[in-house]
Amino acid sequence: MKPTNIQDPEYFHKVVDCQYACPAHTPVPEYIRLIAAGRYTEAYMVNWESNVFPGILGRTCDRPCEPACRRGRIEEEPVAICRLKRVAADNKEEVRHLMPSIPERKNGKKVALIGGGPASLTVARDLAPLGYEIHLYDEWDKGGGMMRTQIPAFRLPESVLDEEVDYILDLGIHTHFNTYVESMKSILEQDYDAIFVGTGAPRGRDLDLPGREKAGTNIHIGIEWLASVAFGHTSKIGKKVIVLGGGNTAMDCCRTSRRLGGDEVKVIVRSPFKDMKASPWEIEDAQREDIPILNNMPPKEFVVKNGKLKGVVFGKVAAIYGEDGKRRLIPTGEPDVFIEADDVIIAIGQDNAFPWVERDLGIKFGKWDLPVVDKTTFQSTLDRVFFGGDAAFGPENVITAVAHGHQAAISIDLFCRGESVYNRPAPYTNLVSQKMGIHEWSYDSPVVADKRYLVPHAEKQVALSNRTVEVELGFDQPTGFKEAQRCLNCDVQTVFNTSRCIECDACMDICPTSCITFTANGEEEDLRARLLAPANNTSQDLYVSENLPTGRVMVKDEDVCLHCGLCAERCPTAAWDMQKYLYQVTKATPIWNISEQSTI
Amino acid sequence: MTYIKPKFRHPELPKNKIGFAKADYEGAISTLCGGCGHDSISGAIVQACYELSIEPHRLAKLSGIGCSSKTPTYFLSNSHGFNAVHGRMPSIATGASMANRNLIYLGVSGDGDSASIGMGQFVHAIRRNVNMVYIVMNNGCYGLTKGQNSATADIGSLSKGGAENHYPAIDLVGLALELGATFVGRSFSGDKTQLVPLIKAAMSHPGFALLDVVSPCVTFNNKPESTKSYDYVRAHLEATATIDFVPEKEEITVNYPEGKSAHVELHDGSVIHLHKLAPNWNPTDRFSAVNRLLEAKMKGEVLTGLLYIDPKSQDMHELENTVDQPLNTLREEELCPGSEALEKINASFR
C-alpha cells in the first residue's frame, strides 16, 4: 500500500467516527470534553455553530453518530452522544451574547426562504450576519416546520423548540407566517436575489384499500394528524387505535394516541419486526407505554358498518429472502385476522409535493417529481432557486436538513456576490500536539470501563396523562460527566513520524487492542490478513507509514484504536504523538470560534 | 499521568488451541523506559507461549535482579514466579526443577546478573544441563544504576557519556559452547520474526537452552557507536539461518529448498527447520558453531540465530536418574516403602 496521506483533511476526519457520520460534522469529542469540564455554555455553542438546534437535536436527533461510535465496536454500547448534547443545552447559561451580531447596514441583497423548518432556519442563521435581508414564509403561525408539527411535545417541549427557533428569528428575519406560498412564479416576480425552498416532504401517504372512503373521518394520515394535535385542533381519539406503519412517525402516532384517550393502541406492520424503520430507542419507548407491535400483517380492508369504522382485516405473511437478497412477503395461508378499531392512523411514509411550483419557470423536475438539485451546491436548474432539507432529495431527518442549509447558504452567498457556486471553501482543520510531559497529555487519556448510562424517564402514569409532559428527563450533571468520560477522544489522533522511528516495537507491544503491526508492505487485502489482529472492518482505514530502515512499514488498523496514547507514551523517540485534530465545516460566515474555547 | 493499561482488547483477537487469546499471556504494564529492548523480548515471550498453547499454570518464570529481572512482572501474569537474589536465579531454578520436573522453567537474567555477580551460578546451571530456558537480556550496561559498562560491553564501544570501554567482553554464547551447553542461540530484541521461533524451540529443548538476546538500553546505551545500540546491531546483524519451529504433530506446510536447509528433530517430535544462510556451519556440530562464531567476531558481525543444538541432550533428571513424578506428588508409601524394601537395598550391598 502507498503511505497514508495524512495531509488529506478527510483522513483524520474519518477516524473521528461520530463526527464523520454526522451530516453536519459536529465536532462531537470537542463538546463532550467541554461537558466533562462543566463548561456547558461553550459545549452548547460548539453545537449551535454546527447543528443550530442543540436542544432540539439533543432530544430528537436520528443520531447517525451513535451507531458509528468507536465505543460500540469495543464494548456493547456507544457513547450516549445525543443525550450528552441535551446535557449541554439543559445546563447552559445565557448564550445570546455569544451569537453573531447583525449588521445595521444591510448588504442590499434579499433572500426568500419558503418553509420555516430546520433547513430554512439554518440558511437564515448563516446569512443574516452577512447583512442579507431575509424573508421567511410558512403556512403555520410559528416557525420550526416539521419539528413543530411532527414531533410530539412529550419528546420535544414547545419551550425548547421556541427558544431555538427564536434565536434565529431574532437575527432580524422578516417572517411571513400564516402565509402559504401558492405560486413560485409570484415569488420569482418579487425582487429576491435568491430563493431557498425548504418545504420538506409534507404529503403523508394514504392507503387505498376497500372501505377507505366510507370510513372517512376515523382514518387519519399520520403527519397531518400529528400536526393537528400539535396545534390543538385534535385532542381526542377513540379507545381502540390501530397505527399502520413501522417508522418513527408511527411511533409518535401510537404514543400520542395513548395520551389522547387510546387505551388499546396497537402498531401493526406488514413486514418483520426487525425490518422496522423506526429507531430502536423509539420502538423501545413505545413498547414501554404498553403498545404491542404486531408484525408480518399487511392490512387488506377497512371494515365499516352503518357508516362507522369497526376495524381492519389483516393478512398473514412471512418474509422470504431470495438469493438476490431481496425480501418478498409471501402469504402463509393462515386465515385473515380482524382487529377492532375506533380509529386508524396511517403512518406509512411521506412524499414531497410541489403543487405550488409552476413547471414552466425553468425549474426542472426529475424522478419521483423531485426537483433536479445539485448535490453539492443545492442549486436547482434555475440559478437563483436553491432547495434543501427533505424538499431537495426526499425525506431524511433534521440534522441532514441542517447540513443542507449550511451548504445552500454558502451557495446563496457566492451566487449573490457573483461568484461561482462551485468555488466552495475548504474545511477548517488544525492538528496540534497534546504532549504535556513524558506520560502526560492535555486530554483525559485513561479509558474508563463504564457501561452506557440510562436516561431517567418520567413516571409512566404522569407521562400518559398529558401529552406535553416530557418523557425523557435527561442526564443530571454527575451522570452527564460519567457518560462524557466514556468518550474515547477519537479526535486526538495517533500521528506517526517515520523518520523518527527506531523500530523498537514498543508501541506494537503495548497497544491494548493490537492495532499496530510492523511488517513487510503488501496490497491492502493481504496486509489486512497479516496484522497482529485481523483487520476485518474494511470501512476503517489502515494507516501505513513510509518504508522504515529495515524495509518494513508501520501499519495501524484504525478500527478499534482506543486513543489511549500508550503507543506515544512508550515511544522513546516521539515517533508517535497524540495530536488533536479539529475539523470544522466552513460556514457562509464565521459563527463561533471553537478553537479558542477548547478545553485542550 | 497515565500508567494505566485499558482493559479493552481487540474483540476479534484469535484464540490458540487451548482457547486462550494472546492477551491471556500478558502481564502488568511495564515500568521500564519506553522503547526498552526488554519489553520487546517480553512481547516475544508472550507470543511464543501463546503460539505453543502453553497453559499458564504449567510455567514458572524465575529471575534475579536488574532491569531484565523485573520483566517477569510484565508477562505471563497467570504463571508461577520467583524473583531471586542478584545472580542466584540458577540455583533457585535448579532446585525448583529438581522438586517439580513437570513445569516449564523460564529464567530471565541480564548481563550483570549473569556475566558478573551470577557468573558462578550461570556456568554450573549449564554444566548440569538444568531443563530450562535461560534468556539473557543483554544490553551491555547497568541500566538500573544509570548505564555503567557491564562485562558484556565490547571493547571500543562508547557509553552514553562518550567514554570508551577498554575491557574485553565476556561472550556468554562462546562460554556456553565451551561449557558444553546443549542449546545455544543468540537473537536481537528488535527481530521478533527470529526471536519468537527461537524461544519456542528453546522451550521444547530437553535441557539448558541459552538465548543471549541483544537488547538495547534506549536510555543509557543507544548511541550509534555503542555495539548494543539499535542502529549498530541492525547494521551488523548476521543470521546463521532463518528459523521455523514446527511443534509436535503439526503438518509441515512450508517447502524448504534442498541443500541449504537443515531439520533438527526434537525428542517430543517437534522439528526446527533452518534455512541456512551461513556457509560451513552445521547446527548440530559444536565445532562448526564455535568456528562460525569466532569468524563473525573477527568481522565485527553480530551473529544471531540458532548456533548449536544437541538433539541427544540429556538433562539433569536423566543424568541423575530421578523419579518421573514431581516430589510433592510422592505419597508416604512411595517415600517410605517399609523395612522389606530396606532389607532388599541393604542386601544389594552385601
Image: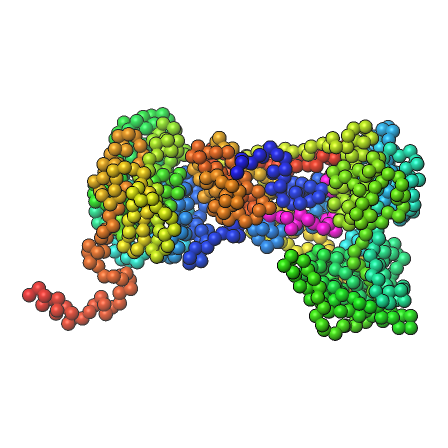
Given the current orientation, which residue lies at the most extreme left position? Answer: B350
- Which residue lies at the image location 30% right of the left edge and 58% below the top edge? B102
Instruction: Identify the image quadrant of residue B236.
Output: top left
Instruction: Identify the image quadrant of residue A309.
Output: bottom right
Q: Position of residue A544 (x, y in %)?
A: 52, 38
> Taking A141 as reference, is A147 left or right?
left
Q: Position of residue A270 (x, y in %)?
A: 74, 64
Q: Position of residue B345 (x, y in %)?
A: 12, 66
Check the image and report above or below for A158 versus B347: above
Residue A54 magenta-highlighted: yes
> Taking B123 as reference, is A469 left or right?
right
Given the current orientation, which residue lies at the most extreme bottom position? Answer: A335
Q: Is residue B147 visible?
A: no
> Taking B91 as reference, is A305 left or right?
right
- Which residue lies at the image location 37% right of the left edge and 54% below the top edge? B251
Asked whether A256 or B256 is in front, the reply is B256
Check the image and report above or below for B11 versus A112: below
- Which residue lies at the image location 75% right of the left edge and 32% below the top edge? A422
What are the residue bounds of the magenta stretch? A48-70
Q: Position of residue A409 (x, y in %)?
A: 79, 36
Asked whether A318 or B38 is in front, the reply is A318
| Quadrant in which the C terminus of chain A appears | top right
